[in-house]
Structure formats: structure tokens, C-alpha cells
């Protein structure tokens, strides 16, 4: 992951509040005003999804964040920011606000059970599929 990309994301998200990042699980967690609302993995930015905003990400084909564990591919409710948003601060603000709103809803209802990461593939992946 590029430190230049992380710095660029900070710059894009700065109008929304105090932005900070924290390394985690091989990626970077992004916090706005101390709310975990996005992550960066492999130089892609993903925003937090939930029942209220997920359809907007899916409607424009934003893929979910996925990771491999024990031969299975898992998907989380974080959706990649549209490519055009990375070049347009106004557009980025729109998508970032969706992730921030999901983080606010979660903070307002901490007892709400989060959906666990779901396998995207139910079979073991072969070594050639992992590369």
C-alpha cells in the first residue's frame, strides 16, 4: 500500500472532519471524527456499508472488500469508492458521507448485531485461483 495514496485520501476526506488513519490487518483503517468509516487495502478505498446505504454502492457496481482465509474468499460490507470519485472531491464527499452515516448509525446503536463476513465462495480455492 502506498503512503502517497493514504495521504491523498486524507486530503480528499479532510472537508468532512478530522481524518486519521491506523494500520490494521495489512491495510489501513480510516476514521473521520473518530468514527471508523472506511478502509484502504491494496491502494483501493472502501466505505462502510449497511442496510441503508448498501444499495447505492451496488447500483453503481462498487465491489465489496474481500479477503481470503483458509482457502475461502470472504466479503465484508465495505464498498470500493467509484473510480471517478477519486478525481472529484465533490463526488468523493457524497460517497464518504454514505460511509460516515453508516458509522454514525452503528455508533448510535452499538448493541445492533453486525453481520459477519460471509463467504463469497463456498469451496476451497486452488493455488492458481489465489494468485
Image: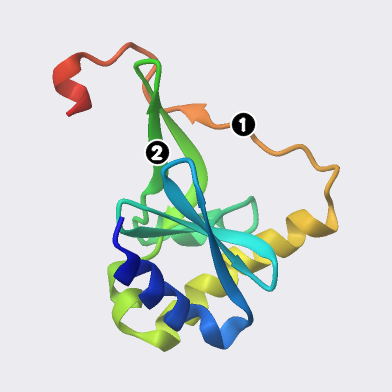
Vertical comparison of 60 with 23: above or below: below
Q: Quadrant of the N terminus?
A: bottom left
Side (left or right) of 87 relative to 96? left
| Residue that appears at 64% across and 57% down | 52
Side (left or right) of 98 relative to 58? right
Side (left or right) of 65 relative to 14? left
Contact (Cβ within 8 Å) of mark 2 with mark 1: no
Vertical comparison of 93 with 102: above or below: below
Q: Quadrant of residue 102?
A: bottom right
Label 1 CA crowd tier, 10 Å (few <14, some 14–19, many 20+): few
Vertical comparison of 47 with 72: above or below: below
Vertical comparison of 43 with 131: above or below: below
Q: Secondary structure at mark 2?
A: strand
Circle count: 2
Residue 116: mark in rendering: 1
Q: Secondary structure at mark 1?
A: loop
Position in image of residue 74 (x %, y %):
44, 30
| Residue that appears at 48% across and 40% down | 25
Q: Quadrant of residue 85?
A: bottom left
Position in image of residue 19 (x %, y %):
58, 75
Residue 66: mark in rendering: 2
Label 2 CA crowd tier, 10 Å (few <14, some 14–19, many 20+): some
* Disc on the earlier residue, 2 or 1: 2
Position in image of residue 77 (x %, y %):
53, 46
| Residue that appears at 55% across and 88% down | 15
Q: Quadrant of the C terminus?
A: top left
Position in image of residue 7 (x %, y %):
39, 74
| Residue that appears at 52% across and 72% down | 96
Amino acid at each position: 500500500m502506498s503512503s502517497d495514496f493514504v495521504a491523498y485520501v486524507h486530503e480528499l476526506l479532510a472537508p468532512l472532519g478530522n481524518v486519521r488513519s491506523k494500520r490494521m490487518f495489512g491495510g489501513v483503517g480510516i476514521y473521520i471524527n473518530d468514527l471508523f468509516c472506511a478502509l484502504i487495502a491494496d491502494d483501493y478505498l472502501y466505505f462502510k456499508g449497511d442496510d441503508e446505504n448498501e444499495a447505492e454502492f451496488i447500483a453503481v457496481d462498487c465491489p465489496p472488500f474481500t479477503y481470503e482465509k483458509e482457502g475461502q474468499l470472504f466479503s465484508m460490507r465495505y464498498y470500493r469508492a467509484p473510480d471517478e470519485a477519486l478525481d472529484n472531491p465533490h463526488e468523493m464527499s457524497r460517497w464518504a458521507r454514505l460511509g460516515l452515516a453508516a458509522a454514525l448509525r452503528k455508533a448510535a446503536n452499538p448493541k445492533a448485531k453486525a453481520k459477519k463476513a460471509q463467504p463469497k465462495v463456498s469451496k476451497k480455492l486452488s493455488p492458481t485461483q489465489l494468485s
